[in-house]
Image (cartoon, grey):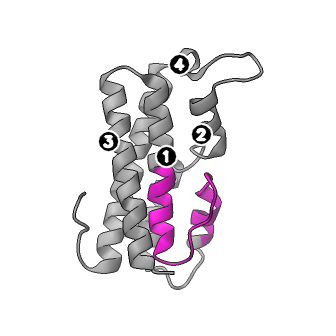
Amino acid sequence: MNSYEDARFRLDLARGYLARAESDAREKKWDGCLANAQEAVENAGKSILAHFRPTPQTHDVIDPLEKLLKLDAVPRTIKQQLNAALDDFRNMGIKMHIRATYGDESTRTPPWKLIQEREASEGLGKARRATALAETVFTEMTGSPDQKS
């Protein structure tokens, strides 16, 4: 495991998915906005996790992030920031991934008919905040900001 490279890679992914979500929002493609926002949140969480432990192969990062708060190896300032931001990672896992990617299979409703502006905008806000936190944690853990790619 190379925590620096893993964290940087996941941060790059978070930034890229956030940029896609922003673009989809401008074009009023709410399903794409939410799907990309979910991926941004997921990868932002994995970037944070990568500094301290291997990244899990899951869409749901809330449980591993909550467990991270209990580790002595995590600096107090990062614990405080992460604890304050946990709500940005909630409900942005596998269920959201499926909803934004596949829609509602029980009603046969595709995501572009299911996802509305309000839900997408809430997801986009979470993605912005989660990615910003991942950037902050990266800087604090490495001593230098990662160059945006």
Q: Check disc 4 and give the amino acid type.
A: Trp
In the visual, does 130 lie left or right of 52? left
Per the image, the residue denoted by label 3 is 19
Q: Which residues are magenta?
A: 41-67
Label pair 4/2, CB-CB below 8 angstroms: no
**Which one is nearer the viewer's eye here, 74 or 1?**
1
Q: Residue furthest bottom?
A: 73
Indicate which disc, 2 or 1, sits on the residue closer to the N terminus: 1
In the visual, does 38 lie left or right of 102? left
Indicate which disc, 1 or 4, sits on the residue closer to the N terminus: 1
Per the image, the residue denoted by label 2 is 97
Per the image, the residue denoted by label 4 is 112
* Residue 4 on image: x %, y %: 39, 77
Element at label 3: helix
Task: Give the spatial CA distance, label 4 vs label 3.
Answer: 19 Å
**Residue 128 seen from this side:** no
Q: Check disc 1 and give the amino acid type.
A: Glu
* Residue 110 on image: x %, y %: 61, 19
Task: Give the spatial CA distance, label 2 vs label 3.
Answer: 17 Å
Magenta stretch: includes residue 21:
no
Indicate which disc, 2 or 3, sits on the residue closer to the N terminus: 3
Q: Check disc 2 and give the amino acid type.
A: His
Per the image, the residue denoted by label 1 is 39
Indicate which disc, 4 or 2, sits on the residue closer to the N terminus: 2
Crowdedness near tag 2: few (<14), some (14–19) or many (≥20) residues, C-alpha within 10 Å: many
Task: Give the spatial CA distance, label 4 vs label 2.
Answer: 14 Å
Q: Is residue 84 above or below residue 48?
A: above
